[in-house]
């Protein structure tokens, strides 16, 4: 079951993120990686913030990580979330890929059970024929 | 070398409209802007034709060209627009001071006007525009493609993530955040201009308020307000001949720590538990020639209470991570606290005019006109939006 109801914003595939979303639909979590200096980056950017190169490839993450921080949203600011509050938003620190931070949600986890440091693993949420969103669950 | 601008420029006039809850303004945003500018210039004892510079920040919808033409301002020689939102409330005063000190302008007015009834509320999520393929219904491109579909779509939610991390690393509690709200509300009870005048707040009220984005509840969040304010900057030399005692701009600083920036996820990890203002603080104290121990009163921008706590740490009133214990026991409350903050009620309880009204309260403190007047106040620190780079801050000094 999708984490959010219909009506939530859906990502558009753009040139910068062309590799990310098709891989996500195949349930593979790709992280952008500078092929000049080796720095990983997420969210995707056109240039490396470390060496300013535009050369990059995409590296598949194991999807394992831990909760770096989180919030429990009680006040909906978008109509699609009116009936799902309280919901959690987590920032996951991946175990690999330079420990980049990934904004997501923790599925099957009550609000009072979310905790910083909790080990998690990616779980895919197919929301359209083109788009799957990486959520996480307790590992 | 002493900062060449130290005390050379001053705030010589302040003007405000009435402040109301968002959507309650009886006039347009543009009219509010014009009124605030007129009142500030009148307070200074100047005429509108003396104004030759305007300094504003991003999101200001009352165009300087329209304001100048409508108010009969004379030849405009300097106009400045700073990026961002509330982070810029002190930067526009810095820019006004630089323009005056350099001789590029004589009298610069800084202003901010907000009428959310006319233009919509800030706290709501905005979706759909500006993707590479154009707006497509509820589709999002760019960085929001990774945040909005996970329900991360408001300022409160983003700043709550930092507050939670500070709690995890340092043992900070929601009671510590509550001390910041309670101080602001207590001060607002003495300020008839405050939107929350007549609405006192207890620690219990703070703890029981509805959840916005954990750990933030309602009273941890700035208000949404309508109103406008403006202030006049000129040289301290010219200020000596004007109607009011000037308030000296002892120091002004702005900027960001290397690695900080628009992508919150890419910042160095230590910035998750900081206001990102350590560099601004170091510059500011050096420029003004004072330290944290010289600050008698402070106006600290509250986007959210946890960010105020981190501001207190960044400006050296306590060590990093010790903001929680520091604010316990009434430290922030006038008249007995060691560091009274937001003495007009601040963004939480006076009004949220994107922080510019905090500069006004700093001026009142050093004129001896605050409704929570700190005895013999000589230095007031004013800090603009924390954790929102590039941010900015001022140290204002009493004239005599």
Image: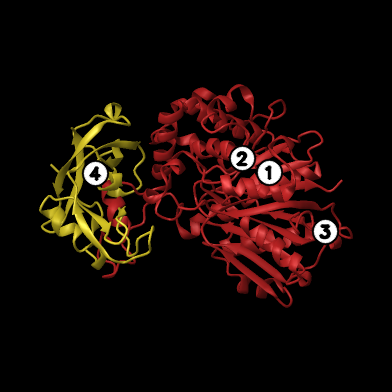
Find disc 2 in the rendering and name its residue.
B315
Badge 3: residue crowd in 10 Å (few <14, some 14–19, many ≥20): many
Where residue B129 appears, as percent x and y from the top left, is: 33, 65
For mark 2, name the chain: B
> What scheme was used to colour the molecule?
by chain
Which corner quadrant holds the C terminus of chain B? top right
Give the chain letter for red.
B
Query: Do callouts 4 and 2 point to residues on the same chain?
Result: no
Residue at x 31% of width, y 29% of height: A115
Q: CA distance from mark 2 to mark 3?
A: 27 Å
Q: Is residue B58 left or right of residue B104?
A: left
Contact (Cβ within 8 Å) of mark 3 with mark 4: no
First reached walking from the N terminus: tag 2 or tag 3: 3
Q: Chain of mark 4?
A: A
Q: Residues within 10 Å of mark 4 (few under 14, many from 20)?
A: some
For marks 3 and 1, the one nearer the N-term is 3
- Where on the picture, by quarter, is residue B367? top right
Residue sitting farthest toward the bottom: B75
Q: Which residue is mark 4?
A: A96
Gap in angstroms between the C-alphas marked 3 and 1: 19 Å
Displayed quadrant of residue B29: bottom right
> Judging from the image, what is the letter of the chain drawn in yellow?
A
Q: Which mark is residue B381?
A: 1
Q: Are marks 1 and 2 in contact (CB under 8 Å)?
A: yes
- Is there one chain holding both mark 1 and mark 4? no
| Residue A1 x %, y % | 12, 41
> Label 3, on which residue?
B236
């Amino acid at each position: 079951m999708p984490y959010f109801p219909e009506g939530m914003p859906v990502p558009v595939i753009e040139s910068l993120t062309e590799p990310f979303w098709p891989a996500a639909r195949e349930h593979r979590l790709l992280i952008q990686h500078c092929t000049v200096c080796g720095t990983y980056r997420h969210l995707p950017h056109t240039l490396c913030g470390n060496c300013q190169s535009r050369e990059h490839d995409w590296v598949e993450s194991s999807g394992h990580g831990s909760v770096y921080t989180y919030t429990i949203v009680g006040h909906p600011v978008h109509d699609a979330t009116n009936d799902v509050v309280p919901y959690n938003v987590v920032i996951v620190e991946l175990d690999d890929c330079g420990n980049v931070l990934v904004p997501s949600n923790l599925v099957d986890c009550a609000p009072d059970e979310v905790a910083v440091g909790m080990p998690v693993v990616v779980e895919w949420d197919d929301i359209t024929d083109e788009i799957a969103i990486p959520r996480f669950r307790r590992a | 070398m002493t900062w060449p601008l130290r005390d050379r420029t001053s705030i010589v006039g302040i003007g405000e409209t009435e402040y109301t809850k968002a959507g309650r303004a009886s006039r347009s945003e543009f009219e509010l802007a014009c009124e605030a500018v007129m009142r500030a210039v009148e307070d200074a004892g100047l005429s509108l034709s003396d104004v030759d510079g305007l300094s504003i920040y991003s999101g200001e919808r009352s165009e300087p060209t329209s304001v100048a033409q409508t108010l009969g301002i004379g030849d405009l020689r300097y106009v400045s627009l700073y990026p961002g939102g509330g982070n810029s409330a002190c930067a526009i005063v810095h820019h006004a001071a630089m323009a005056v000190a350099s001789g590029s302008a004589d009298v610069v007015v800084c202003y901010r006007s907000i009428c959310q009834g006319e233009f919509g509320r800030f706290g709501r999520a905005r979706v759909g525009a500006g993707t590479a393929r154009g707006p497509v219904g509820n589709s999002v491109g760019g960085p929001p493609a990774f945040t909005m579909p996970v329900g991360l779509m408001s300022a409160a939610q983003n700043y709550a993530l930092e507050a939670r991390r500070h709690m995890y690393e340092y043992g900070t509690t929601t009671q510590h955040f509550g001390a910041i709200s309670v101080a602001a509300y207590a001060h607002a009870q003495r300020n008839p201009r405050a939107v929350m005048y007549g609405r006192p707040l207890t620690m219990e009220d703070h703890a029981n308020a509805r959840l916005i984005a954990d750990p933030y509840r309602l009273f941890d969040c700035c208000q949404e307000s309508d109103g406008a304010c403006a202030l006049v900057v000129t040289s301290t030399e010219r200020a000596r001949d004007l109607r009011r005692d000037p308030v000296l701009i002892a120091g002004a600083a702005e900027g960001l720590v290397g690695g900080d920036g628009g992508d919150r996820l890419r910042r160095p990890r230590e910035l998750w538990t900081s206001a990102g203002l350590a560099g601004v603080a170091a510059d500011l104290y050096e420029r003004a020639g004072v330290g944290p121990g010289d600050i008698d009163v402070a106006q600290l921008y509250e986007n959210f209470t946890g960010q105020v706590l981190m501001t207190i740490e960044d400006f050296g009133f306590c060590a990093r991570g010790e903001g929680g214990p520091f604010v316990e026991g009434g430290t922030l409350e006038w008249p007995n606290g060691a560091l009274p903050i937001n003495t007009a009620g601040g963004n939480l309880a006076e009004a949220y005019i994107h922080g510019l009204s905090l500069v006004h309260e700093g001026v009142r403190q050093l004129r001896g006109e605050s409704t929570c007047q700190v005895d013999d106040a000589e230095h007031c620190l004013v800090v603009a939006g924390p954790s929102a780079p590039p941010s900015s801050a001022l140290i204002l000094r009493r004239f005599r």
